Amino acid sequence: MTCDEAQELITALVDHEALDPERSSLEAHLKECARCRFALEEERVLKQAIRGAGQGIRAPSELRDRILSDPRIFPGKSRPVARWQDYVWPIPHLARPAVAVALLLAIALPTFVLLKSKSEPIAIAALETYDLFLRGELPVRGTENSNEIVEQLTRAVGGHFHPMGYDLTAMDLRPVAGLVREIDGRKILVAIYQGKGGTIFCYTFLGSEADAPPNAARFFDASKKMNFYAFSSGGVNAVLHREGEVICILASEMPMEELLALAQSKAKPS
């Protein structure tokens, strides 16, 4: 089975609709293909997020009554006696279903967006720095001295922890700047690598694996006995892992498979 064939069957597998022999062939392919396993995990996370969002949305009782009492939607039910609301809201009968749907969206969607914004994980908020830097809207003091960047960032947090430092010269990437971002009272050290190999941001802060986005795909590295969390935001891929009390996030526009492999190769088990 090719990857293209597997991609067409992944949704059916997640929905428990895949049939033999295709299901057996797909499962055999997934054991050998990390790329398709990642796509499978993303599909599962997406379905869980949709179900979770749907469970949290409930129409007001009056709106539900109007929809349930519409004989065109539920034939056979007798039309209820007119209530005072029918006179206060004299919308033509034929237009009421459309208005009901519009009201449902007007009430539910802002609530959902508000709840989402309040619960935005720190890992997602940190990635905004990447986009600001590429647009030239993030003031940073550049330097080619990696030791200077480390000292500068370490002083910013009183020496409580150090920025993760990686040697990426093999990828033609070198540290060019460092800065400190504060999100929800937590300081995040940001080291920026650039070169012919592109751009990579390394975020370091104190935290736990709970700081990973809830929809991140988790990969367990048996050789290092560590979890790696892969996620994306605004076209930027990111991989999070924990070393002791320190969280590291590598972020880049490079393909997720390559970024995950890079994070796994550089991680140091506690």
Image (spheres, grey):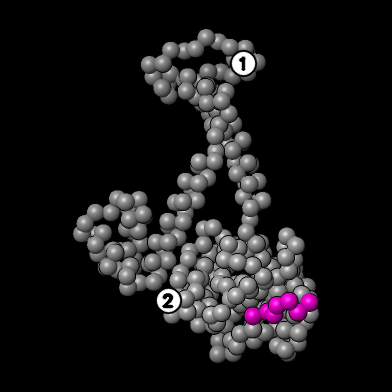
Residue nearer the viewer, 153 or 96: 153
Work out whether 5 lies above or below 74: below
Q: Which mark is residue 61?
A: none
Side (left or right) of 136 relative to 238? right
Identify the residue at horizontal 64%, vertical 67% (top origin): 207
Judging from the image, what secondary structure is the residue with disc 1 in? helix
Residue 222: numbered disc? 2
Instruction: List x then y, in percent, for residue 199.
Output: 62, 78
**Rendered residue at 62%/12% (across/down):** 84
Residue 63 picture quarter: top right
Label the magenta part by its dominant secondary structure: loop
User: Tag 1 or tag 2, which sits nearer the N-term?
Assistant: 1
Numbered-mark total:
2
From the viewer's side, name the closer residue of 136 and 19: 19
Residue at image point 59% right, 31% down? 103
Question: What is the magenta range?
Answer: 158-164
Look at the image and tell me whether residue 50 can be seen.
yes
Q: Is residue 253 visible?
A: no
Hey, what amino acid is under mark 1? Gln
Q: Where in the figure is residue 209, as x and y percent of width and height?
A: 57, 66
| Three-letter amino acid code at the position of disc 2 | Ala
Task: Point out the residue furthest to the top here.
Answer: 81
Relative to residue 269, is residue 186 drawn left or right?
right
Mark toward the viewer: 2 or 1: 2
Spatial separation of the CA atoms under disc 2 and disc 1: 63 Å
The disc at residue 85 is 1
For residue 137, side relative to residue 226 (left or right)? right
